[in-house]
Each structure stands twice: as C-alpha cells, then as structure tokens.
Image (tube, rainbow, N blue to C red):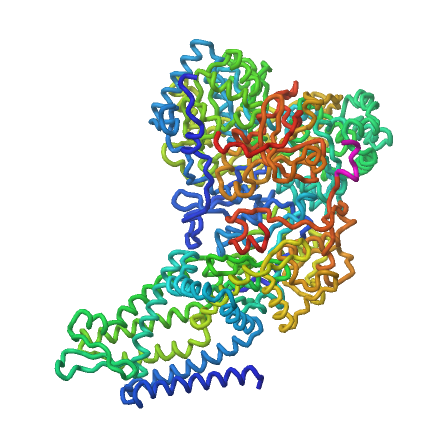
Amino acid sequence: MSTKLADSTNIIEAFGPHPAYSHGVWLDTGVEPDKVVKTHCCFCGQQCGIQLKVKDNQVIGFEPWYDFPFNQGKLCPKGIKRYLQGAHPDRLLHAYGRDATAASGFNAIPYEQAIDRVAAEINRIQSQYGPHAFAVLSGASLTTEKAYLMGKFAHACLKTSNIDYNGRLCMVSAGAGNKKAFGIDRAANPWSDILHAEVVWISGANVAECAPITTDYVWQARENGAKIIVVDPRITPIARTCDLFMPIKPGRDVALFNGILHLMIAHDWLDHDFIDRHTVGFAEVAAHVEEWTPQRTAEVTGIAEKLIHQAAEWWGTAKTSFLMHARGIEHHSHGVQNVLGAINMVLASGRLGRENCGYATITGQGNGQGGREHGQKCDQLPGGRDLGNPEHRAYVAKVWGMSPDELPPPGVDAYEIFRKIDAGEIRGLLSICFNPVVSLPDNNFIRRMLEKLEFFVAIDFFMNETSHYADIVLPGSLHEEDEGVVATAEGRVIKINKATEPPGEARQDWRIIQDIAQAIRRERGFAFNNSAEIFEELRQASAGGIVDYSGITYEKIERQYGVFWPCRSDDDPGTPRLFEPGAWNPIAQGKGPFYFPDGKARFNVARYTPPAEEVDREYPIMLTTGRVVSHYLSGAQTRRIGPLVDHYPEPRIEMHPLLASRLGIADGDWATVESRRGSCTLRVQVVKTIRPDTIFIPYHWAGRQSANQLTIAAQDPISKIPEYKVCAVRVKKAIQAPPEKE
Amino acid sequence: MPVPQRMEFFIDLGRCIGCQACVQACTECDTHKGQSMIQLDYLDRANSTQTVPVICMHCDSPTCAEVCPADAIKKTEDGVVQTARKPRCIACNNCVLACPFGVPKMNTPMNLMMKCDMCYDRTSVGLKPMCASVCPSQALFFGTREEIERLRPRSKPVNRFQFGGQIITTKVKMLAPKDTPADAVDITAAMYQPTIGQNILEEMLLEI
Amino acid sequence: MRREVVKAAAWGVVVTLLLASLIVLGSRNLSHFDAALVAYTFAVLFATFGLTYRYAMWLQRPPTALYWKRGWQVFFKRGYRARNIGNWFKHIFNDIVLNRFIWSRDRLRGLTHWLIMWGCILAVAITFPLVFGWLHFESLPERPEWYRVFFFGFPTFSFPSGSIFGFVIFHGLVWASFLVIAGVMLAMRRRMREEGAVALQLFAEDFLPLILLFSVSLTGLMLTASYTWMKGYAYDFLAIVHAITVIFTFLWLPFGKFFHIFQRPAQLGVRFYKDVGQHEEAAICRRCQQPFTSRMHVEDLIRVEAELGYRYEINAPGVEHYQWICPPCRRVLFALAQGKLWQGRRGGVDLGVAPPSPPAYVNPAIGEGPLGQEDKNNFHA
C-alpha cells in the first residue's frame, strides 16, 4: 500500500452508496423515448429479455419484451428498477487517485495520467518481482467478449498465471462436477424441459428470490401434473406449497443424494439400459451408497425417514423429471461431491438427454455461464480449453499469434491469490467487476491483504467497497453502455445491446484494458475497434473446443432469440439440449453423447464429509448465507437503487422461535452473531420458516453489516469454492444497535 | 378505447412468491407513475412466507363507488373501475374502508384516493397491465380465456365472492380448482383459517 | 315522481326565486339593471336552478347525507369548537386559497389550477355584481372625471377615472382572462402530452370546460381590443359571440366538471370528521385486534351500506359485520379463502395459531408502499 487509507465514512459520503429514486424525466409520462433498445437484464443468470427506453443518452424506463421466449415479458424487481443505475449521482465520471488528505479520500485525475500510473506500476512490479507478481481479478457479470479479453490480457499481455474471477464464488462446483461426470460444463437442458417433467427436484435453490422467473416454469410443471420436491434448510416461498419439502441440515446434501440412490437401487428404480449403454462407474457408486441406508441418511441430513422414502419413490418411479440445484449445495467445502451426488441420481434414472428429462444448475451471475467459458479462470483458455493442456495451448497461442511457451502455466484461484499476497508472492492487483471485500469469506483477512498490496487498480462504474483500497480507480462502463454476448443459465448465448454512451470520462471496459496494454507497450493483439471484432476472434479461439462458438454470429442471435452453444458452423442452429442420443461432439467423435473419448457419462463416487467447521459447545449454531430478491451479489449496484433498498433495507438474521426463545431474543431485537473469524450485529427476524439449529443472513451488505465477516474460508479441494453455506457461530442478544458509522 | 373484451385478468394467489415485482412495476404505470397501487402483504410472516398480492377486482357493482359521497369513482363501459376523479374526490376514506377486497389507497397530501385501474393506459391500447406482464410466478395473469384453459387445466375461473350476506361479482377472476362445487368463494368463512405451508417442526424434523 | 326529485326541484325553485328577488332588490327595482344583459341574467338564473337541484340531489345520496349531517355535528361538537374554528381558517387557506393539495400532486398542475381558479374568481367577482345591477359607477356631479362606486345601491368610495387605479379597475376582466388563458394552455399541454392523462380523459368531462373557458376569455379580450384600438369594429357581433360562450358556460355549470366548484368545499367537512374521529375511539379489527380507523367511521359506513342495500352482515360470533375487519385482513382473507380451496391439491398443511397475527405490508417504505399516514394507519404499515 503506497499511501495511507482514507476514512471510509468520507468515501461513502462522497461516492455512495446513495439510493437513487425516480424523479424528473423518469416520472414524466409525456416524454417520448428517442429509441427503445431490446437487450437483457443485468442482474442474474437468467438474463431476461427487456426493452430499455432511451431519451437523450439516458435510460428513462423499460417496457416488457413479450417476444423473448425465456421470460416473455416477466421481470423481477431488480430488472424493473435497473434503469435507476444510469444517471446515478454515484456514477464514476473520472479516473481517481487515492489521496488520504482529500476530503473524499480520492482526487479526480486525468484519465491518461491514471493509465500511465497503472502502466508504470505494472512494469515496475513485474520487472522487480517477476510477471506472476501482478494478479488480475475479473468478474462473471462482464460480457463474454470482455471476459475473453481479460483472459487474454492476463495470459498473453501480462503473461501472469494469476488471473481468476468471481465465478469462483459461484458456479465452479457445478462446473467441476459437470466436467467430471459429463465432460462439459453447461445446463444439460433448456428450461422448457421443466414444463412437462413428472417430478421437479430443487436442491439448495431459493428459486423464488434468486431466479424468480424460473418460478413460473416450476408452477407450470405443477399445472401439468408434476410433483415438486424442494430440499432447503429454509421454507423459501417456492417450498411453501411444494409437494415434498425436506428441511435439510446445511452441508449434508450428498448424504441425501446417496440415500436416494440407495433406495433406487434397493427398489430397482433404475434405467439399466441407459446405465449400461451410456455410463461407466455405476458399480463403484452402487457399492458406495450401500451404507447410505434411509436410517443413516436421516441421521446425517436431519430429515425424517418417511420423507426420504417418499422422495425416492417419486424420483425413482417417474417417467420424466428435471433436477435443479444452485449455490445451496455448491457453496461447500465438498460442493463438488454434492453436485456429483445429484448427477449420480440423474444418471441412474436415465432421464437425461431427452425431452422433459433434464438436469441443470441455476447459474447465478449475469454472465455466470459465459464468464466461465473463455479463459478468465485460472486454468482455462478460450473454448473451454485447459491452460495445462499442450494441444490446447498450441491452438490458442496460434490464434493469438504467439508461441505456446510464452503462455504462463495455470495459476491459482481467487482466494489463493489473496493468500499469495499474504506470502508476498503477489504485489500488484488489477480488479474489475469484483467486490471481494464484500463477497469473499472471512473478509477481514481480505481487507488486510488489500492494504498490503504495493499497487491496486480497480475498474468499476461505482466506487465499490473494494475500490476504497485502490490506488487508482478507472471509470468503467455500465451494462447498457456496451454491446456483447452473454450465455444464460440455459446455455443460450444472447446479445446485450448498447443503449447509451458512457458519460464523462468513463469508457467501455475493453477500451480501458486496451489502453493499459498500449501504455505498457504490449499492444499486440489489443487493437480491437469494437466488441464485434473481439467476438470474431473469440469465435476462432473457441472453434473446435468443447465450448464451440464458431457458428454463432450477432445476426444469428437476434434472428433466433439466442443460440445455444455448442454451435459449430454457420448452418448449425445450436444445441438447446445436450446428450441427445446420436449427438456428436469433438471429444467422443460420435461414439456417444457425452464429452469423453468413449462418449459415456461418468458415475463418480460422491463422498460425504461434514462441513469444515462443525458446531460445538462454543459455537453451537449453524450459519447459512444467501441472497434476497431485491439485491444482487455484493450490492454495489442494487444498494444504490432506492426502491430496491426500501424493499430490503438492511440484512436481518432469520431465526426460528425455538432458538430465539432459548436465547431470549424477540422479533426485531438486535443480536450479535460471532464466529471464530468475526462478529456482526444485526436485527433479528423470528420466523418458523427456518431450521431451529440454523440461522440465515443475506450477504449483500458491506462493512459492519457484512455476513462474510463470519463465514469460513474453507474451500472445496477440487473447485476451490468457499464454504459460504455453513459455518459455526454463536448468537447473543445485543444490548443496543451497532453504531451507524463504519 | 375500451379494454378488449377477450382479454381477461386471472389471479391465482397461491402462486405468489412475494417478490414485489408487481409492486415495483406498478410504479411504472403511466396513470399513477411513481406510486404503486398493488397491495402486497405477508399473511403471517412469523409462520409462513405466504404473501397476497391484491389488485382491484373491478366489481360489477362497486361498493367503493356506491359509498363515495362525492360520486367520484366511475366505472368505464368496459367494466374498469377507475381511480377517483381528481376534481371530485374529497379524500373521505369511505372507499378505502368499504372495499371488500381492501384495494384503494389514500394519498392524504394530495387529498386523493388512488387505486388500481388495470393499467388503463396500457390495457386500453391492447397491452397487458404492468403487474401481470412482469409477475414471475404468474399469480397475476392477463390473457384470453383460451390461454388460461390451456395453461391451467386444473383450474376454473370464479368471479363471485361471498362476504357474509353479500355476494360480489367481479370482472377479475380468481382461479379455483376445477371441481370446486360452490359457485361463489366464501371469503369470510376463512376468517380463522390459518395460513397453509410446510412446517419444519412438527412434521419432519428428526432432531433439533 | 320520486320524492328526492320533488325535494330537489323545490329547493331549486326556492333558491332561484331568492336570487331573482335579490336582483330586483339590489338593482333598486331594476333601475340600475342593464337591459342588454338580460340574457346573461336568465342564464344565471337557469344555472342557479340546475346547480341547486343537483346539489340537493347529491346531498340526498346516503353517504353524502350522512357526511353532511356528521360534518355539522362534529363541527359543533362540544370540546372541539374552538379547535374546529381555528382549523376552518387553516383549511380554507391551505385548501381553497392556496390549493396546496393540488400543488403536491404536481407543481405544474398546481400552477395550472391556481391560474384558472383565480382568473375565474376575479371575473365572477366583477361581472356578477355588474350584471345583477349590484354594482354601478356614477360620475361625481362636482368632478365629472371622478367616479363613485355604488354597491347594492349604496354609495362607497370614488376615484379619478384616468388614474392607474382606474385603469386597473376598468380592465379587471382583461387581467382575469390573462390568468385563465395561461392556465388553460398549461392544462391543454398536459392533456395532450401525458400518457396517463391521455388514457383517462373524456371530451365532455375534460376538454369541453377548457374550451369554454378559453372561448369566454378570448371573445372577452376581443371585445376590449375592438373598442380600444379598432374603433368598435365588429363590436356587436363579438358581443353576441361572447354572450353565447358565457351563457353556454353557465348552462354547463351543473352538469360537467364545473360542478366540483360547488362540491369541493365538502372537503372541509371531511377534514373535521377525520380530525374529530382521530381523537375519539378507534375501531379495532375483529380479526387481528389492531386499531384502524375511527369507530364512528365504521359505524357510519355500516349504516350507509345498509341504506344502499348491501348485506355485509356476518353470522360469525364476535364479528357481526364485515366492516369491522381492517383492509389488510380483508386481503388476507381473500388469499386464505383461495388457499382453502386448493388445500390437499397443493402441498402444505395448516400452519396457524390463534388468534391470527396482524398482516404486515411487505414494502413499508412510502415510495412503493402506503401513500400516506392514513394508509399507514389503515394498513398497520
């Protein structure tokens, strides 16, 4: 850290979050928009279609886009009010340099000067400590073009191994599980396959709040006769009237899946033909689940045996089904095992790769799917290729016009980057679209590490809490200020269209990255004039890979309302449903529908291990964290939108009345939650809709309200996802409200 | 222009997930921009996540209009009960207190009752109302009779509601199970009906 | 003929006759009455009959009748009189003089209404006494360039005709028309551009009054222009056109939007009713046991609904009448009744506890929630 930190109270006063409300042109019903732009919502992986009304380079409102097939006009509150983030008083219009003596903690500086400073620091750190001493953190809310460019920037320009992205906190367990079982990381089915499934199984997904539009698909399935099974420690709105609700103890999902598979085998509710022809490894898995009797499953999961029997029977005997899961089973130190357990259940049923038979993870971030495909992950190259694979390195190096040897070896995950800062291996950091001070677990450690950096540059459109630690903040672009593609939770590649120009000195993120590349005189391969040119290169770089975009064009996306990848040629309409019998892929070369050389899916033994931190006498309560419907990720955007702030103004501790009465806490009281890593004082909401041994805190807030002061940095050994969904805490009634200021 | 006859409003409260998309979208309606007319309540948050979104049901003989001393509430020929006419409304609160569904709101500083007018600016030009357009659970649905029959094969629309000795017939339809025998939904019979949902404690928990 | 019609017609006749006799009296047996204005006089007399008739019909509607009665009762209620008189001045000033409630809808709308209202009040204050012969000017015999003002036949002050004061007085209608025309322009602009207004407006209800006000003002101005600068060019024709517009406006008074001028003061009565109600016993919801409005208001509504033929009585013990249920509980009942129909078909069991807990508004913020303190009280937000 080169200069002293400014007082965060002053920074917040100057840069927000300030909640914005509709006024002026936003309320005037007499204003005719100059244009109406068809694009998508920036919040969450469903990427609902929306039309933005634009007047004088300002988004003044929206109009439902009824023709877009996924959501047909439907939107959640975040999408409805997203227009308030444009023309926002907190919007960064200049580059800023940190100056603890300035009233706001930062001084506006000319953009060119800021870029030169960044370039000088990159050069200094890399020449002094080696190329890997400068790390890059990126995000999965960027368009795929930007995500691709970030990967290329780190690997081909900075030549550092150390790039990773915030999807590490989100989708990686599902991705790793899918790659191990299917050889490909994408939702196997479009959501339309939910509609006529006989059983819809939802594990660890608060669909109503985190993927609200999916609700209509689930209810529509019920209209068509489906049974809805929900597994969750909380009675979420979708769980309230589901047909079977299993209130599982946080972190025990794989035990339940194994228990169900045990019963499927015991009753021979198996698709032997499918298992024989399309899978390998069933015998080992069958042997492993033998010990998962209903009794043991019930003991571990905290779910009554009769419910487990009921679920197994419905799942086992169904003709069609759809299994969905989300962060609830993935945010664990054994998240991949949970995912594999779920996949085993699906594979044993044989209900995959057919109409109305499906499996999917509900991707959380705006471009959660596309952001994890083209090279901004620590071990990845475009097209879903591996940085550790010599053939893959050779292919991509050729596209990038360099020698494969120049490419760095695979790096480490986002959390490990901070541990390397601790170890002194990383000295400089560039962060874009990432707010680790709010979103990473044990964030008191993260703060210390950011302070320790020699140089930190952040690119963002608002001053998020992580940027408080930045030496230089560069003004990036909002979602509506750039064009590009993203891939939705379904694997549908869609097009974000530009509605407005970036204001002031702000500019499109890819331009900023190119400006930096130029300033450090490594501009080769960073001379794109627009997003379309980046996409053209991305198509080439992905061609022949698993994540093949080579047949996708902007024009085809508009014509077809999106293109499901893989799409391998101009006349390929895309692949809405994976693993259909007879489907071709570059790995199996026609031997089968799955992405392995033999074309067969893999059963993987899914082992149960308890959460990294079990409850004990000292910390007797389980804490689980998650989202609320009106906020998105670290809240850098939604905490600035007034109506969304009003909707859910501050985090509350959800607690069962049994636990509350034992602790002497009443509804509305303040309580302090403590873990081994930190503590947090919040208001309590006493509700019967949560397990009595578990409390819930949403994670969208910063500073003293941040739930991630408490969470544990234990990570899955395979996916490196942190264990946000369970840690041990103790709770006591607080005498008074916490101080207002930081 | 009147609202097309074939387009009807159907509500299925059991689908509601309380996400407030309707509440937020309602503020985008041009006839009352910036203010939401949807009433969305937690029935009993301590026990359940159940929520109820209420839009104006547009009664055939609207109690609100009948009890209005200023004769300010008018129904258009297409059966839409409009918000109070601004020059007339004297903000007496009668409509707020008399509406059997609890729909109208009182804007005290403006001396004006405001209520859902089925997004007249949209529906009168053939568009869907804001709330039904965005509703992620489609608890609020606006479309044709054929669409609802195709999409909700287990439901039948009911538009007669009983409040004690009074039957109220509405333009907006509620979805009841297909084989519901009664032709009017008895609202006041649910006076002491508890909320419905899952129960962690009694039903399924193995241990605490 | 229905009883209330006879009653209203009788009131109409009485008030019209009263005005007619006042005209005879005030103009000293028509000696100061300008015969050229006879058409105006008859139009006003007709409008008076129409307005009285409609007002009387309106007052006989059960809710209005009750409010009318209660309004006076609470105004003179023991213990509230001094306070009510103080409030009366406050409300007159805020509501009627300033139109504060309209400004809070939208500043431009406030300005629009203010211009039109004050323009009309000024014009009426000048023309009516002139037309009825209640006001006339005479030259002072000793100083012919001075005028003396006579009101209701009594002499008052005098002033020189050529003074600035005289100019202002004699052109009072010009100033009034400037105010009205500006207001009408603003109103027209809003009605033509705002989507919300466009969706709801009706020609007879919303445009006709504006057109009438505009034509009255414009033809009046043309008269002034004709005799001031054009040596009376087409004066007679303009006078007839002006008379037609004014007379039509009068005839339209009882029917359209203009009726609100006479109806609106009822707002004052409502204010006293709510103010007194707030200080008296509250109604308690018989489902959630929370207070909501005043007990008086609920009981009055029960009476009004019975008179209107509604049968919201409930047999359930301790409830009696649906009116005793607060608005949020009514919404809850609506959901519970539907849930009950689906029970056994959709998942879930009865969760309840007795007595039922009060519903809570999901978005308590004013921005998207209740629209004001009254709503907050009614909705327990």
Name the residue located 44 percent from the left edge and 20 percent from the top edge.
A456
Q: Nearer the viewer, residue A16 or A266?
A: A16
B77 versus C237 height, above or below:
above
Q: Is residue A159 above or below residue C169?
A: above
- Image coords of residue A59 (percent x, y): 44, 44
Magenta stretch: includes residue A505: no
Q: Which residue is rendered at x = 73% and y = 23% of the image? A: A602
Residue at 20%, 70% in the rendered image? C165
From the viewer's perspective, tell me whether residue C76 is left or right of residue A693.
Answer: left
Q: Nearer the viewer, residue A236 or C91?
A: C91
- Location of the N terminus of chain A by quadrant is top left
Looking at the image, which residue sits at the far front?
Answer: C79
The image position of residue C64, as x and y in percent, is: 54, 72
Quadrant of the rendered structure where residue A701 is?
top right
Q: Range of the magenta residues?
A: B200-208
- Of residues C226 and C77, the one nearer the viewer is C77
